[in-house]
Amino acid sequence: MTDEDGALIVDARATLFGFDDRPVRAGIIPRSRAWRVGGAARTFAVFAVIAPFVAVFPPHAVWFLGALVTGGILARRRYIERFTLVSVDGRCPKCDGALSVKKSRLKEPHALPCEGCNHEPALRVPAEALPGLDD
Ligand SMILES: [Zn+2]
């Protein structure tokens, strides 16, 4: 099942120590290898182009290396983003408040900040709910 943005809607659970799990629906976009590699290469390329320009300012080598390292870190972040979490529809296990997320890389477990009680229930998506990727 997918939503209007093409995200896969999967059944998951919101867990918080000391409270009963709550079922939630998570919107997840699987990312292809091409999307991850292409995005990582573009990200690194941008910083590689910027590096000689920021190196004009002293201390030159620090800015140059800093730009390359930053590009590498951001590129790696893109490369490991196998799934993007775009939405969560569910309630907090503790206070029954609505949970919300910002679009970001799906982590395991993924923290879901609750504005109602300021706790962070963990989103747990069963591995079998996620599609297998080509790599
Ligand atoms: Zn709460």
Image: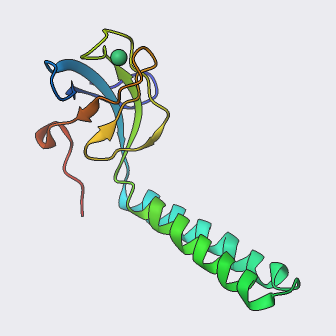
Q: Where's the N terminus, which quadrant?
A: top left
Q: Residue at x 19, y 18 (%)?
A: 23
Q: Which residue is drawn at 81% across and 87% down?
A: 59
Q: Where's the C terminus, which quadrant?
A: bottom left
* 39 up-or-down from 71: above or below: above
Compare residues 2 and 11 and report the one nearer the observer.
11
Q: Position of residue 131 (x, y in %)?
A: 21, 44
* 63 up-or-down from 2: above or below: below
Residue sticking out furthest to the bottom: 61
Left or right: residue 75 compared with residue 36: right
The quadrant in which residue 90 appears is top left
Colour approach in the figure: rainbow
Q: Where is residue 48 in the image (x, y as percent from the top left)?
A: 68, 79
* 42 up-or-down from 108: above or below: below
Compare residues 62 and 10 and report the one nearer the observer.
62
Q: Where is residue 113 in the image (x, y as percent from the top left)?
A: 41, 28
Q: Where is residue 63 in the image (x, y as percent from the top left)?
A: 74, 81
Count the numbered circles shown: 0
Q: Which residue is drawn at 60% across and 71% down?
A: 71
The quadrant in which residue 60 appears is bottom right
Q: Residue at x 27, y 33 (%)?
A: 122
Left or right: residue 49 compared with residue 112: right
For ligand 1, which image quadrant applies?
A: top left
Residue sticking out furthest to the top: 96
The quadrant in which residue 45 appears is bottom right
